[in-house]
Amino acid sequence: MNKRLHIASDHAGVALKDAISRRLAQQGYEMIDHGTHSDASCDYPVFAHALCTAVEQENGRGILICGTGIGMSMAANRHAGIRAALCTTELHARLTRQHNNANVLCLGARMTGDILAQAIVDAFLDTDFEGGRHQRRLDQLSPNA
Ligand code: RB5
């Protein structure tokens, strides 16, 4: 699997973003950090759109973090090529890879502790899409598809 990974957050998620980024870089991932780079208040859609544009262009993978994960997932799923999943358990992360072929993981830094968040990231990165009937369903995700 490609070890290039996009990551972005708003101010609420920046500490978790940096912790996840450092750990994955140590594991050999090439981390592309789209910001934010401080805890100064900022607007999460800016960072969601920057990351999602890059993920769409590369057919890559990404992680988005805000306070709840909800705003990031809403913004990300406006992109036609993005299947973003807000995950609060490792099981969510495994199943959204197996069934939904999610290409963006969303986390809520104010909802999910750091150790659990890291385990969710690992499950997301280590699980493959199952294809088959799940691909048929993904083909129907967009209205009028
Ligand atoms: C920022 O205060 C907060 O609204 C944001 O991080 C996120 O939780 C939005 O969905």
Image (cartoon, rainbow, N blue to C red):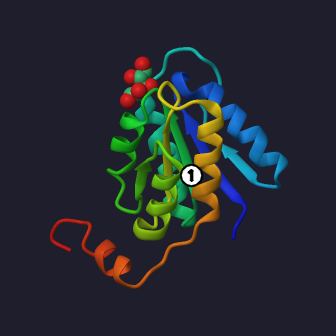
Residue at coordinates 65% horizontally, 25% vertically from top-left? 15
Residue 8, quarter of picture? top right
Question: Please, what secondary structure does the residue beneath circle 1 have?
Answer: strand
Q: Is residue 39 above or below residue 33?
A: above
Q: Nearer the viewer, residue 126 or 28?
A: 126
Residue at coordinates 54% horizontally, 22% vertically from top-left? 11
Q: Nearer the viewer, residue 75 or 50?
A: 75
The residue indicated by pointer 1 is 62
Quadrant observed for ligand 1 in the rendered image: top left
Looking at the image, can residue 129 be seen?
A: yes
User: Mark 1 belongs to which amino acid?
Assistant: Gly
- Quadrant location of the N terminus in the rendered image: bottom right
Q: Is residue 122 above or below residue 139?
A: above
Dot 1 crowding, Cα within 10 Å, few <14, some 14–19, many 20+: many
Residue at coordinates 58% horizontally, 48% vertically from top-left? 120
**Which x, y percent locates residue 124?**
57, 57
Q: Is residue 110 left or right of residue 99?
A: right
